[in-house]
Amino acid sequence: MNILKTLTLSVVILFSLGAYAQDSKIKGQLPDGGRMVNLQDPEYAETTFQNILDLYKGKVVYLDFWASWCRPCKNEMPHSSKVKEQFKGKDVVFVYISSDRDPKAWKNGVSQLNIKGENYLTSGNVWKDYNALFNVKTIPRYVLIDKEGKVVSANAKRPSNPEIVTDINKLL
């Protein structure tokens, strides 16, 4: 009987560890608790933009479409950090989606700009999805989504605009 319990417990632990390892890989966990996911990797070939949004159900989502070569995008990042700090511990998530083509440039940009949190390098598939929804012709571009997943503003204010704090607070 004890052998059966031990064997059952071992199987449960192994499956749990396997699921945890897979979950961590999908999330691309960073030490700050954020993600760094290169959607161009083959393992994410079937990932959709909706898959990404589904990760944040129940939270206000502030999407930031940017690229490492975009000067206005880079100029907004310090402001984004300040706004994000104001919402620390609240049901708000800042999601950064880069349209860089080169993963190395994206990683360097995230590092140099100290972008903490949820970082994605877009794939062609995800790019098509979000452009069908938001028609992102220029960057930086910001989108605000409420806790139910409804787009509140497809052209949200930039982080440098103090009114964005009020707009986010209204959704909490």
Image (cartoon, rainbow, N blue to C red):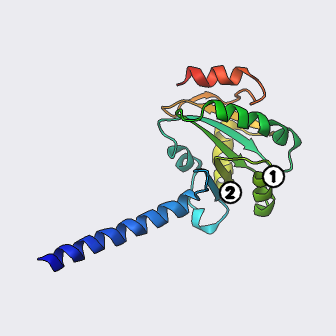
In the image shown, does 40 or 114 lie closer to the viewer? 114
Of the two numbered discs 2 and 1 on the same chain, state the one appearing first in sequence. Answer: 1
Q: Is residue 137 above or below residue 17?
A: above
Nearest the camera: 31 or 24?
A: 31
- Side (left or right) of 112 relative to 49: right
In the image, is 39 to the left or to the right of 140? left
84 up-or-down from 114: above or below: above
7 relative to 119, above or below: below
Horizontal placement of 36 versus 4: left or right?
right
- Rate crowding at label 2 as few (under 14), some (14 to 19) or many (20 or more) other CA atoms within 10 Å: many
The local secondary structure at tag 2 comes to: loop
For the point 18% across and 73% down, which residue is it?
5
Outermost residue toward the left? 1
Total labels drawn: 2
Q: Residue 123 has which mark? A: 2
Name the residue at 86% across, 50% down.
69
Disc 2 marks a residue whose amino acid type is: Ser
Q: Can you give x and y, in whole percent of width and height, for residue 128 in the image?
A: 67, 49
* Alpha carbon separation for disc pair 2 and 1: 22 Å
Foreground disc of the pair 2, 1 = 1
Tag 1 secondary structure? helix
Compare residues 77 and 154 and report the one nearer the observer: 77
**Where does the image place residue 64, in percent across and percent down from the top left?**
70, 40
What residue sits right under mark 1 in the picture? 112
Residue depicted at 54% across the width and 35% down the height: 89
Q: Position of residue 48 (x, y in %)?
A: 57, 52
Which corner quadrant of the image does residue 74 belong to? top right
Categorize mark 1 by other alpha carbons within 10 Å: few (<14), some (14-19), many (20+).
few
Q: Amino acid at mark 1?
A: Gln
Taking depth in this image into account, of 77 and 103 the one nearest to the observer is 77
Residue 92 position in % (x across, y down): 57, 34
Q: Left or right: where does residue 7 sit relative to residue 34?
A: left
